[in-house]
Each structure stands twice: as C-alpha cells, then as structure tokens.
Amino acid sequence: MRQRVSRREFVLGTACALVAARTTRALRADLSAQQIVDRIRANVGVPWKASSSDGVKAGAVTTPVTGVATTVMATIDVLRRAAAAGQNFVITQEPVFYALNDEAGNRATDPVYLAKKAFVDEHRLVVFRFADHWSARQPNDAVKALAGALGWSGKELAGADQMYQVPETTLGALIADVRRRLGLRGGLRVVGQPTLTVRTVFVSPGTTTVPMTTAALRRADVIVTGEPREWEAVPYVLDTWAAHAPKGMIHIGRVVSEEPGMQACAKWIKSFTPEVPVEHIASADPYWSPAS
Amino acid sequence: MTAQQIVSRIQQKLADLKIAWRAQTVDTFKAGSPDTEVKGIATTGMATFDLLRRAAAAGKNFVITHEPTFYNHTDQTAALEDDPIYRAKQQFIKENSLVIFRFHDHAHALQPDPLVVGSARMLGLTQYASPTEPRIYVVPETTLKAFASDISKRLNGRALRVVGNPDMNVRRIMLGPGYSVPPLTSSFDLSIGGENPESGGNAEYVLDAAALGQQKGVILLGHMMSEDWGMKEAADWLRAFLTDVPIDWIPTGEPFSTPA
C-alpha cells in the first residue's frame, strides 16, 4: 500500500492531471483485468471450456483497469478510441490479430501487425477475446439484442428459441426495414424473392449452420443472420425455391449482426463491475457495394 | 458410355498428367447410379436444385459439380433424411435418372488451376498475370472504385462486397477463388476471392492498414461468382479427351440479390 501511495504522489506531482485522475481511480478500485475476467467466468452461467477462442490476446492480465470497452472487432480505430477514453481493458468478440486463433503466423513481421501490437503495448491495453462463452449463454443475449435492434422485443415465439413472430410483411419490405434499422451498406445480401410472405423470423447473429437452418425453416419463413457459408446454408435456402417451398435468408454480415449483442455485453459486465466505467465502442458495416 | 467410364477416363487423363488420384478426396459420386448411360455432361459451380432442373431440361443427365450437392463439404446426408427439401431434390434426381459427380480436389490439382484461370479470364486479368509470382496480377494503375465497378459489370454479379477506400490506387492484385481469398500483406494492394470469414482476416486488416495511412482493399465476389467460370474451363478440358458425348458448362449463377 505504501508503495502505491508513493507512486500516486509521484503521478500527482507531474503536469499530467488526466493521467493522475485515472491512475488514482484505478488504485482506489484496485481492480485488475484478471479480476474482471474472473467475474465474467463466475457470472457467465456456462462452464468455462478447457479449450476455446476466449482469453487474453494482448497485454498483461495484472494491469489495473481504468475502464472497460466492449466491441465486436478490436480494430486499431477501436483501440485508439478505447485508449483515448481511458478504457484500457478491451473485450472483443472477434479476433484482434487477423486470424481466428489470433496467432501472428505469416504476419509476424508484417508492418500492420507490428504497429497494432506496438499500440497495445504503448498504451498498456489489455485485449480479451470473449466469443465462445458469450454465444453459449442461455438465454442468448446476442439473439435478444439483435431482435431488439430490429424492433422485435416481446415478439418471441413461446417455446421456440431465436424465433420471432413479426407483423405480416413481405421479404422485400422486411429487407428495407432491416437495412434502415441496422445502417447496412454493402454487407446486405439476400436469398429469395421479395414477394415472399413473412410472419416468422429466425434470428441468428454470427452464422447459421445447416442443422440450424433446416430446423429453423420448418417453422420460420426467413432467417436473419450474419455470414452463413455459401456452400452450406445458402444453397439449402436456394433449393427451397426449386422445391416449391420457398424461404428467405437475409445476410447482414458478422460484425453488424453481433453489434447489438456486444452493446448488451457492456451492460451485463457493468452489472457486476461497478467500480469502473464500462462502455460499448461501435463498429460499422465494413462493406460497400460497387452497384450503389 | 456410362458415368463410371467417364470418371475412369478422367482419372486416366490425370494419371497421364502425373496427377495421382487421391485416396482421401471429396471427388466421388454424390447421387445416381454410376452405371447410367450418359447422354450429356453439364459442368457447373454447384449442383443446386435449380441447376439440376436446367441440366435435365437440356438433356444433360451427368452433372459434374465443383461444390457439394447436399449442403456440406463431404455431402453427408444422414441428418437430412427427413428433410423435405433434401427429399424433393433426391426425388428429382431419381425421376430424371441424373448422376452427380464432384470434381473439386483434382480440378484444383490441375496446372494451371482451371478455377483460377476461369476467374482471371472473367475479371479481365489474364493479360496482367505476373510472369514470376503465382496468382499476382499487375494492372495499369486504377482506383478501387473504378476497378470494382468494372468487374461488377463483367460478372453481372449482384452482391460483390468491397472493403477499402474507394479512391485508393490499385496496381498489384492477388486472386484466390472460392474460399482461398489471399490474406493481404504489404506486398500487394488488393485481394480478390469468393468468400471468407468477415472477422479474423482481410476486413480487419484493411481497416487497420487504413488507420495507419496504408491503402489496402479486398473484393469478395461471392463463392459462385468466383468459381462458376472455372467449371467452364473444366468443360473445355474435358471436351479435349471426351469427344463422344456432348459437354456444356451450365452456370449455377448468382445466388444473391441486394435490394435497396
């Protein structure tokens, strides 16, 4: 404690009042990144897997946390905004180093990779990946949050996971509504004809597998999802048309589909981390289309 | 000639080219009887139900497809047995005595890879191929916006997606059809491919490079808009040694629309 006080006095003695304020707050809270990770694990409600994508991808877990930022994808822009706001603990759903396992691989000497690593080090950020366990939670907050962003809160079909009963519409009208509500640019792609009648929608942020797709379309008219594979769920939905049992699929991109979920994640983390600010940093549809 | 005899001729041709048939491969019969007498061959990017209808209508009862028929890489069907769409597709195949064979691993093993050749040709890149660097194309300097508009028109694709500053200069391009979208590095400007996960790769790299003042781009054509054309090359390759049966390329086509 004595050592900490003297460090605090040293910092207060410098001209940088902002840094001093943040350091003081962190010392008073005495909350490390590891302690927040422990709280996440204690609250997530599913057993922590021995092997998963989740974990600290950059920075030291012993770092005192001044603020937490949640985000879908920890780009350099997101890290800069987090650092500027004093949020030195960044919780990202998607990778930070351009690979699903966050290994540098062939990019170990790449200038973009090195610059990103250097930024994390210079600003003493800690980056934690939180994907597998966040998606495994029941009920799934990411589904509820995306449905909420689409205006369907309270329209859950009883006894049917991820299924929403929407006011009767057409696929064409639904697409326009989804585009507007989520601010989509080039990332929106659709399988199916606009005249299709829609009453029931399956909401699946991230991706949707073939087993999920075949099961969901027994009941739903349309699936709203992030990025299904084009040799799996996509041809299945295409084939519903040739089979004269037509269904639709609206792709909104992974980042856009997970955005409301990570917004909800910030609130969830705040609920058991009252000592420090917890905010969400938004990303946008990364794509544009040459046609528009 | 039966479908099995045609496959044997393909295997013999590959052997002549010193390409060994793999013990582990997805290139197998997916539906129909290999003993079926073949009236005509259709090559295509993916054996969708709609494609099968068009092939049958054109009198092509042997479909050689690059991608799966039954919605997963190894065409496992056990979990689909009760599925109404799967059953309708199987029923159609049976009623029309179609035979479906996948030509994926060994198509990519050909030198040059017909999937790359076909994609480059459709994109107008063939003449710009680097003589020394595989899959690199060096084009007269243009902008990402101009280049993307040009290839969008060439492919008549409805759902091309681009990441990167539209005004950036493009000169060095790397092409990888299908799922093998080239990972961006400092050695080229623009990566073009079919489909890839949005996270953990090029999109994030483009955004980060831009934050550092470096201009990079990626164009995702969609899986079919990048590989359908390669099966046209495959049809040409087959026609050279299978002269006694009509062979046509029937494009699977763009699966997506992008309504406003």
Image (spheres, coloured by chain):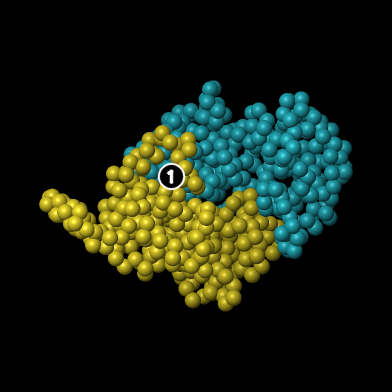
Chain colours: A yellow, B cyan
Q: How many marks?
A: 1
Q: Position of residue B90 (x, y in %)?
A: 78, 56
Viewer can see residue A281: no
> Could you tell whether B126 is left or right of A58 in the image?
right
> Could you tell whether A66 is left or right of A130 in the image?
left
Picture layout, residue B258 above or below residue B147 = below
Residue at image position (35%, 56%) is: A33
Depth order, front residue of A210/B245: A210
> Could you tell whether B199 is left or right of B116 in the image?
left
> Could you tell whether A168 is left or right of A69 in the image?
right
Label 1: chain letter: A
SS for callout 1: loop
Q: Amino acid at mark 1?
A: Phe
Q: Position of residue A246 (x, y in %)?
A: 66, 63
Label 1 crowding class (10 Å Cα cut-off): few <14, some 14-19, many 20+?
many
Quadrant of the image for the N terminus of chain B? Answer: top right
Depth order, front residue of A291/A258: A258
Residue at image position (42%, 48%) is: A57
Picture layout, residue B81 above or below residue A231 = below
From the image, tell me which residue sits under label 1: A97
Depth order, front residue of B88/A73: A73
Q: Position of residue B10 (x, y in %)?
A: 78, 33
Q: Position of residue A28 (x, y in %)?
A: 23, 62
Viewer can see residue A106: yes
Residue at image position (66%, 28%) is: B111
Q: Quadrant of residue A2?
A: bottom left
Q: Quadrant of residue A108?
A: top left
Residue at image position (84%, 44%) is: B34
Residue found at the very far top of the displayed protein = B131
